[in-house]
Amino acid sequence: ANDGRLTPRKFYASQIMVRPGQSNVFHHGRRLFQLYLVDQAAKIEAERLSYLRLHQEDLRSETYSGLRDALYAADGQRREDADPNHVGRPVFLSSSFVGGPRYMM
């Protein structure tokens, strides 16, 4: 949903855009420009991962039953060997997250 905010990806895309009749100082930086691009790509990915981590309820992650399956048997009783400290806290990546396992399918 676009609520009028400028995403980091759109901002950096506009910064490096080639415009007819205008010189862009970024493109003359050679390796420094490449470093800039890698840094901004890492920043964009970190921002996207942070969003996914903080908006799990909005993404309906409660519908995923993997954690529940790891802790409880089919009859609903708590498994003796299940330790929630060893299961971890799952963060579900949307299928549109580039680089995630569901995106690769």
Image (cartoon, rainbow, N blue to C red):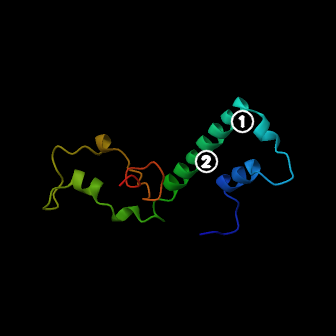
Examine the rendered structure and indicate whether residue 15 appears above or below residue 30. below
Q: Check disc 2 and report the residue beneath it.
A: 44
N-terminal label among 1 and 2: 1
**Residue 41, horizontal then vertical, whole percent:** 61, 43
Q: Name the one closer to the observer, 33 or 77.
A: 33
Q: Check disc 1 and report the residue beneath it.
A: 33
For mark 2, give the secondary structure. Answer: helix
Please name the amino acid that badge 2 sits on. Answer: Ile
Residue for point 67% across, 35% down: 34
- Total numbered labels: 2
Question: In which quadrant of the rendered image does the C terminus lie?
Answer: bottom left
Please name the amino acid that badge 1 sits on. Answer: Phe
Question: In which quadrant of the rendered image does the N terminus lie?
Answer: bottom right
Q: Name the one closer to the observer, 95 or 53.
A: 95
Residue for point 17% across, 43% down: 81
Q: Residues within 10 Å of mark 2 (few under 14, many from 20)?
A: some
- Residue 77, image quadrant: bottom left
Examine the rendered structure and indicate whether residue 98 appears above or below residue 32. below
Q: Name the one closer to the observer, 27 or 3.
A: 27
- Residue 20, image quadrant: bottom right
